[in-house]
Amino acid sequence: MAGSRLERFGTVFTRVRDLMRSGVIRPSEKPIWYDVYEAFPPKRDPLYVKPHTRPSTKKRETVPEIFYREDEARAKFYEQYGTGLRPLDLSKSSFISTCQRFVDKYTELQSHSELDGSALFEETGKALLSEGIVLRRRGAPPVSAESRDPVLELKLTEMLAEQQVVSAAQQSVSVDSEETTHSTHTP
């Protein structure tokens, strides 16, 4: 009895009482609370009652999936455009992702127009493009070959050719000036 430290084999009071009777605890070493507990014992002894551990018979409640109206547009956005080129910047509290801008514009256009899902999706993309937000479809090249302006490409090649001519002329002028300075300084 004295070796057990579990409440199920007697109360703390009965263990201390038995230790005092056997002489392990001297009367001068008895705990302060011992006399109070002996004078005013509880109406019911505090006994250890093993909790019942039966298998659960209750049905587990499944949490229903929560969908919002904009979740459908958000899922279609990620399916069409993916996550984008840049990562989300969560260090700024005022940061709004491209997807969230798309969903906001989608709901705004949905409330004002009577277009169906796919047409409304395309109109939202066009509206964001007019605001300066470029959306790139998954798997599409960054700039398609048809969208390049051939005049711009021609001007670019002309500019590069002019720069090469100018740099070649500058090099020949610097070589000529070095030769003239070298020939004038040599006796």
Image: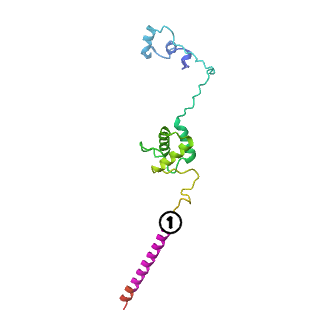
Q: Position of residue 60 (x, y in %)?
A: 60, 25
Residue 80 is left or right of residue 160, and the answer is: right
Look at the image and tell me in which quarter the N terminus lies.
top right
- Mark 1 residue element: helix
Q: Residue at x 56, y 41 (%)?
A: 117
Of all residues shown, which one is farthest toward the bottom? Answer: 187
Query: Local crowd at mark 1 within 10 Å, few (<14), some, or many (≥20)?
Result: few
* Amino acid at pointer 1: Val
Q: Which residues are magenta?
A: 151-179
Residue identified by numbered label 1: 151
Q: Position of residue 71 (x, y in %)?
A: 54, 38
Residue 76 is left or right of residue 167, and the answer is: right
Q: Is residue 163 above or below residue 135?
A: below
Q: Residue at x 51, y 47 (%)?
A: 125
**For residue 30, which quarter of the picture?**
top left
Look at the image and tell me in which quarter the C terminus lies.
bottom left
Q: How is the image coloured?
A: rainbow
Q: Is residue 40 visible?
A: yes
Reply yes or no: does residue 165 show up in magenta.
Answer: yes
Q: Residue at x 55, y 44 (%)?
A: 119
Of 160 and 120, which appears nearest the observer? 120
